Image (cartoon, grey):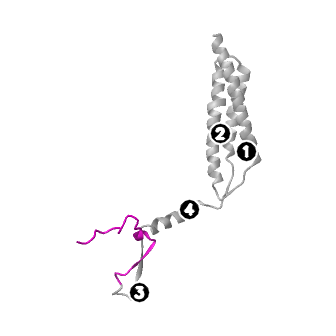
Amino acid sequence: MASPPGPKGPFDYSEYRTRRTDFSNAANSDAPTTRSTVFDEPTARVNSSLSESLSLSEGKPPVHWLLAAALGVAVGLVIAVSEGRSALAAAAWLLTGPLALGLLAVYTRADLVQRARFSYRPTALAGILYAAVLAGAAIGVLLSGWHFADWLARR
């Protein structure tokens, strides 16, 4: 009885080599031919896609997301300070809290994509603006939350 096709044992990976010499055509030709296996094609595709995706363009911080977050924080702080104890304090809390932090998260994700490029040039403005937005958001959330809670308690 002949053994079934496949590996000869549980640790026989000889059929998964990258190149195999095929002796089946040895009678028809002088030299054995090599045939490629399953692993040659995907490797070539991965290498070509990597070389295409790694362009030589320079990555920069996407400051526009930081500017949008800074605008939201500034408007929220103005509302929180000027309106004081009113229902608009909830709008100020939304602007300085979830909106600003959401825009900071979008900035961080976009910045990571830029940092993955071949070259990345950070700017001092981005770091300063990020810290300012984060500090302003914390102050705005605390201030507007305090005003909103005070307004709600006095109703």
Element marked by disc 2: helix
Magenta residues (range): 1-25
N-term mark: 1 or 2 = 2
Residue carrying label 2:
104
Neighbourhood count class around disc 2 (C-alpha, 10 Å): few under 14, some 14–19, many 20 upward: many
Q: Left of 58 or right of it: where is 41?
A: left
Q: What whole-number distance in Å separates the C-alpha atoms at marks 2 and 4? A: 29 Å
- Count of numbered circles on the image: 4
Which amino acid type is shown beneath numbered disc 2? Answer: Leu
| Quarter of the image that includes the N terminus | bottom left
Per the model, the C-alpha gap separating discs 3 and 2 is 64 Å
| Cβ atoms at labels 3 and 2 below 8 Å apart | no
Q: Are marks 4 and 3 in contact (CB under 8 Å)?
A: no
Dot in front, 1 or 3: 3
Q: Residues within 10 Å of mark 3 (few under 14, many from 20)?
A: few
Q: Which mark is residue 50?
A: 4
Find numbered disc 4 in the image and state the secondary structure of the residue it sits on: helix
Q: Point out which mark residue 31 bears.
A: 3
